[in-house]
Image (cartoon, rainbow, N blue to C red):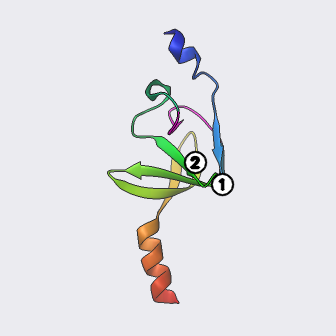
Amino acid sequence: KTHLLRCSGATLSCGTISDVSYPFRSVGDPNYCGHPGLVLDCQNNNIPTIDIVNITYRVLGIDQTTRMKIFREDFGRKLSTRIS
């Protein structure tokens, strides 16, 4: 149980998101510091992403109490290509 104390109060920030805590964890954090399906990666130190069912999504925002806003980048690229 002492290992859980190492996670207590830990927050992560990346790009547009800040002060995110449990049940989310960062890629480099120990597995016991968050839910296995809520692992955030901070690409290039400013682009937060999450993998859900083997698809990578960009995280646009997280409200710890109710929701997470995500964007599927492969759809976005196709959409912006069509608009251009």
Which label was assigned to residue 62?
Answer: 2
Sort mark 1 into few (<14), some (14-19) or many (20+) by Cα contacts within 10 Å. few
Residue 28: image tag = none
Which residues are the magenta region? 19-28
61 or 74, which is in the foreground? 74
Pointer 1: what residue? 16
Residue visible at 42% across and 69% down? 74
Looking at the picture, tell me which residue is in the foreground, 28 or 25: 28
Magenta stretch secondary structure, dominant: loop
> In this orientation, which residue lies closer to the viewer: 30 or 80?
30
* Residues packed near mark 2 inside 10 Å, few (<14), some (14 to 19) or many (20 plus): some
Of 46 and 79, the residue lying toward us: 46
Above-or-below relation of 68 to 83: above
Q: Position of residue 45 (x, y in %)?
A: 64, 51
Where residue 84 sits: x, y (%)? 53, 90
- Find the distance from the CA under tag 2 to the CA under tag 1: 9 Å
30 vs 47: above or below:
above
Q: Residue drawn 39% across and 40% down?
A: 37
* Above or below: residue 27 compared with residue 82: above
